[in-house]
Image (cartoon, rainbow, N blue to C red):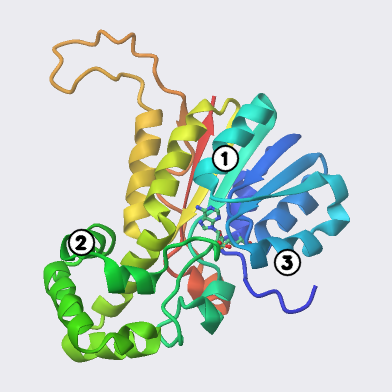
Amino acid sequence: MDNIPHIPVLKNEVLNIFKNLREGILIDCTLGFGGHSEAILKTHPRIKVIGIDKDKDARDFSKTRLTSFKNRFLCESGGFGEVLPKLLDQYQEKVCGVLADIGVSSYQLDTPSRGFGFESDRLDMRMDISNNLDAEKILKNYSQRELIRVFSDFGELREAKKIANLIIQLREHNTLILDSAKSFSQWLKTHFKNPKILPLVYQALRIEVNQELKELDDLLKSVKKLKKAILCIISFHSLEDRAIKNCFKDYAKSCICPEDAMRCECGNNHEIGRIITKKPIIATSYELKHNSRAKCAKLRAFEFY
Ligand SMILES: C[S@@+](CC[C@H](N)C(=O)[O-])C[C@H]1O[C@@H](n2cnc3c(N)ncnc32)[C@H](O)[C@@H]1O
């Protein structure tokens, strides 16, 4: 297929994590443009893939791309936080793998009308365009308190209060600046010389629009049910990577007694699996040369017993 608008990151590393799978269903929570799903379907002839995505453009593309796999590929729409638990209930022990490559696709970043880029004519950032909330609405309507929460929780910005106050003042004088990503980026740059602030403000807005941390939290809770299955998650920022790392540690913990307990009384048999990746896997210099967007990708994997 020509003009595939997204290069899958860490593709070989994902295949390596799933290399021992024989048969069953693998759920690709972030189908995107089907790069990972296609590689898995080609490598594992007895595995079926169910792909989930919030983005209709991505689903439509992948349905065409993966059509030759016939009934070995199924596509579901919606957020994985909601869809994955339903699929796990439906297919139970048939599920042998779950993959999530969380974040935005290159298509979403590079399509100006989707309003993800700093230079877009819109401030949108919705993965699911039927969602009511977009970045412009946040900037135009959220209270000072809500804006501070977004910038400090999702951008970890020390300047959260200052940014929120300036946005509130801006609303009174020139709301036009909040109509496009281009003008909002320019405005931010004139107020904050630190170049890290612009991407962190955008990251915070995107996480809020798409409820990204809530979706990840729901995924991490629902996979607890998996048995004899492998979970592989690729994340792109430290907030997500931290949540994944801590969750895997909890799931691999045998003793769940309080830390100050004098002796173990829990039975010391609570681990539900093992961490496959002691340290996160990152892109090789070869991959980075061909796809700079793999720069922040971190892959962690867990095997459920
Ligand atoms: C980095 S891309 C995945 C690319 C894919 N692995 C490929 O090879 O083409 C992330 C995709 O996941 C989708 N996505 C992100 N969070 C989601 C969520 N919570 N529920 C469903 N889809 C989500 C985005 O719309 C986007 O298409």
Foreground pick, 114 / 228? 114
Residue under the point 59% across and 42% down: 98
Name the kind of residue labelled 1 in the image.
Answer: Leu
Rounded to the nearest angstrom, the CA distance separating label 2 from label 1 is 29 Å
| Of the image marks 2 and 3, the number of the one nearer the N terminus | 3
Rounded to the nearest angstrom, the CA distance separating label 1 from label 3 is 21 Å
> Looking at the image, is 288 positioned above or below residue 237?
below
Name the kind of residue labelled 2 in the image.
Answer: Ser
Foreground pick, 104 / 26? 104
- Residue 281 at x, y percent in the picture: 47, 54
Residue 181 vs residue 195: left or right? right
**Ligand 1 closer than 8 Å to the CB at disc 3?**
no
Q: Which residue is mark 1?
A: 84
Residue under the point 58% across and 42% down: 83
Q: Which residue is mark 2?
A: 152
**Ligand 1 closer than 8 Å to the CB at disc 2?**
no
Q: Which residue is mark 3?
A: 61
Foreground pick, 4 / 149? 149
